[in-house]
Amino acid sequence: MNIMSDLKNLKVCIIGSRGQMGQLFTQCWNGKIGGIYPLDRRPDAADLHPDDIERVVPHVDVLIVSVPLSRFDSVLAAVAPALQAGTILSDVGSVKVQPMQLMEKYHAGPVVGTHPLFGPRNFFPASSGATQADASSPVRQFLKEAFHGLGKQVAITPGRNCPPHALETVDTLFRLGGCDTFITSAAEHDRAIGTIQSLNFLSHLAYFSTAAAIPGLARYVTPSFVRRLLAARTMLGEDAGLFTNIARHTPDMQETIKAYVQNLEKAGRLDNDSLNELLQTLEIYFKPEQYNI
């Protein structure tokens, strides 16, 4: 089977095409595959319209669900009767165990979960104010080399009975859209993502809570403080409830927090041996030849 040749005839339905991720991949795949078929709720409607489901779902090769997890079950229940046996059912959610279970509950055919580890602003930095100089800066080049295309990674989690051609189709589809992919299990994915997101959230929360309790800092903030504040703004503001829930339900999170606190206490000693010991562990990120304190 020639996957690249088949992609020219591949019909993909995106449920939630008006959302940010739906719009992103519509743009990525437009003109590169057989067709993109959007499926969204009609204005002022709570659910997908049955006529729209029947018009689109039975005729596509891949159906990608791009809706919030709170709507995932009801959307699958609505479209499942119209799915063909060979249709590849997929998603783009940030958690994988529960969506994979639901997709395999409603569809006996191929199931391939995915998680793009980025948002539209990360994927198209120029649209969020980045310049060509930014894109070619030494820092961005370093990140590209160190993290192998950081910002465009897609984790792919094949279902229990996923045939090779279905996995290859989804993998190739995302690569065609300019992404780098890797295969993992849903459980490993959720453990890793939960740890990264929780540690990031909790460290930001502790950092800014500490700073907020010290009077008179506002007029002395540095550019690095502002950059961190901007990076944490959505996480600590709009999405605080989401990340609090992730932290509570991430396996082994208490052990990770314990290790974080131990490292913070070690750094707080401010002696050369402790600081150097911690700095040497950062070679995975920065590859330092040596540290001089």
Image (cartoon, rainbow, N blue to C red):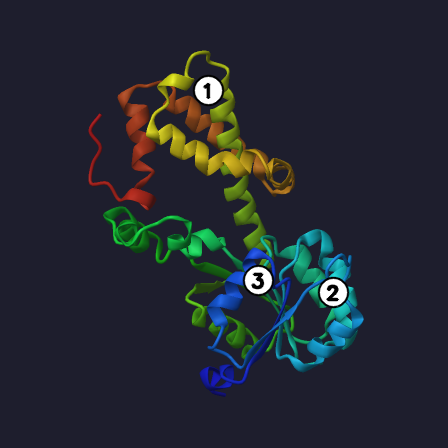
Secondary structure, mark 1, is helix
Total tally of numbered discs in the picture: 3
Give the residue number, with chain letter if any, for mark 2. Answer: 76
N-terminal-most mark, 2 or 3: 3
N-terminal-most mark, 1 or 2: 2
Secondary structure, mark 3, is helix
Secondary structure, mark 2, is helix
Q: Are marks 1 and 3 in contact (CB under 8 Å)?
A: no
Give the residue number, with chain letter if any, for mark 1. Answer: 211
Res. 150 in view: no
Residue 230 located left or right of residue 92: left
Residue type (three-letter) at the residue carrying disc 2? Leu
Which residue reaches farthest top?
Answer: 215
Residue type (three-letter) at the residue carrying disc 1? Ala
How far apart marks 1 and 3 lie (CA) works out to 38 Å
Which residue is at 43% across, 58% downward?
152
Residue type (three-letter) at the residue carrying disc 3? Gly
Res. 286 in view: yes
